[in-house]
Image (spheres, rainbow, N blue to C red):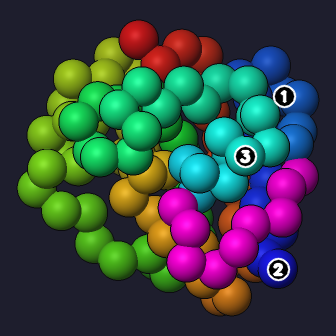
Amino acid sequence: MPKLTFIEHTGREHVVEAAAGQSVMQAAIDHMVPGIIAECGGSCACATCHGYIEGAWSEKLPAMEEGENGMLDGSPYREASSRLTCQVTVTAELDGLVIRLPKSQY
């Protein structure tokens, strides 16, 4: 199973195992990672699963779709590396993925 590392705004790390095919958001929820709220349950209707995908990892992800981009436009903490974790599907190639979390989802 691929391992993902979530890094809270405080620097605290959470390494979790994720099943291929599930969303990064669901992996965080399954392991109770603080900082991922996921109010809409993964339907890309809010931005409360916002995370930052750094460097080469972002190149391994499919391009952001218009709906995700629009949701992120409402986030006060958007950065160039921002993604909604509900829109990122875990694959074997993402083993080792690092996701930094914003100081707040609101």
State whether residue 70 is above or below residue 17. Answer: above
Q: Can you identify the residue that label 1 sits on? A: 11
The N terminus appears in which quarter of the rendering? bottom right
> Residue 30: image x %, image y %?
72, 46
Q: Give the mark, 1 or 3, whose residue is nearer the N terminus.
A: 1
> Residue 83: image x %, image y %?
40, 49
Mark 2–mark 1 Cα distance, whole angstroms, equals: 24 Å
Q: Nearer the viewer, mark 3 or mark 2?
A: 3
Q: Residue at x 59, y 31 (%)?
A: 36
Amino acid type shown at disc 3: Asp
Q: Can you identify the residue that label 3 sits on? A: 30
> Quick one: SS at disc 1?
loop
Crowd class of label 1 (few under 14; some 14 to 19; many from 20; radius 10 Å): few
Mark 1–mark 3 Cα distance, whole angstroms, equals: 20 Å
Amino acid type shown at disc 1: Gly
Crowd class of label 3 (few under 14; some 14 to 19; many from 20; radius 10 Å): few
